[in-house]
């Protein structure tokens, strides 16, 4: 049994399992490739936990993820379980600026999640889209108009504020 299986099959609580995965990713006992390979073969709750661990690590170390791995994460935006969608969006928010060539495909998948019934899925999509819009490396000149339309159509004020802040940041960059 490898280290990932040992942690995930333990009696630890889900949050403790995620914390352990983060720890072994940070100390390089395992790689993101190892964790993604394990997640690919796992049931949805375990897959979501693996993606969550990657999200936590990419907050401080975004370069831990490769382009190939980010492509897999982007593909997870189309998964059915909401938690996989929102954890994937958070990884994208942390890392997409390193791979601007993936922006268009990420935006297309994130846009579909802006219409999701789940608030956390929409919130995570808004966060990722906003970071893309404000990024210096964006390859999408239509992002300000897109963000403005999303802000106008969003019913939740907390999510609307994410878009409005992005628009303000875009405006401040061009002044």
Image (spheres, rainbow, N blue to C red):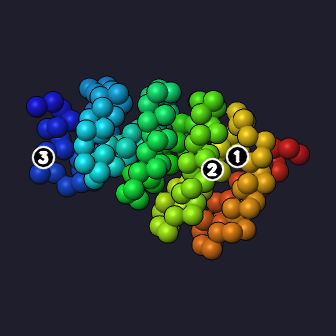
Question: Horizontally, is 126 left or right of 61 in the view?
Answer: right
Q: Nearer the viewer, residue 31 or 71?
A: 71
Q: Residue furthest right?
A: 175
Residue 10, which numbered label? 3
- The residue mark sitting in front, 1 or 3, is 1
Neighbour tally class for label 1: few under 14, some 14-19, many 20 plus, Cα within 10 Å: many
Counting from the top left corner in percent of width and height, residue 157 is at 63, 72
Label 2: few (<14), some (14–19) or many (≥20) C-alpha neighbours in 10 Å: many
Residue 133's tag is 1
Callout 2: SS: helix
Residue indicated by mark 2:
129
> Mark on residue 58?
none
State the separation of the CA atoms marked 1 and 3.
Answer: 41 Å
Asked if disc 2 and disc 1 are in contact, CB closer than 8 Å, the reply is yes
Q: Secondary structure at mark 3?
A: loop
Q: Position of residue 24 (x, y in %)?
A: 28, 33
Q: CA distance from mark 3 to mark 2?
A: 36 Å
């Amino acid at each position: 049994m490898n280290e990932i299986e040992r942690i995930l099959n333990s009696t630890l609580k889900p949050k403790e399992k995620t914390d352990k995965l983060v720890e072994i990713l940070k100390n390089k006992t395992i790689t993101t490739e190892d964790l993604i390979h394990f997640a690919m073969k796992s049931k949805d709750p375990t897959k979501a936990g693996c993606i969550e661990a990657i999200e936590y690590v990419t907050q401080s170390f975004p370069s831990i993820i490769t382009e190939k791995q980010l492509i897999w994460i982007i593909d997870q935006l189309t998964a059915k379980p909401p938690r996989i969608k929102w954890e994937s969006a958070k990884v994208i928010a942390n890392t997409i600026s390193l791979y601007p060539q993936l922006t268009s495909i990420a935006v297309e998948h994130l846009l579909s999640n802006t219409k999701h019934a789940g608030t956390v899925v929409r919130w995570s999509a808004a966060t990722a889209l906003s970071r893309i819009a404000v990024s210096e490396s964006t390859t999408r000149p239509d992002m300000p108009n897109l963000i403005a339309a999303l802000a106008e159509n969003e019913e939740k004020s907390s999510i609307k504020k994410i878009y409005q802040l992005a628009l303000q940041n875009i405006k401040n960059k061009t002044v």
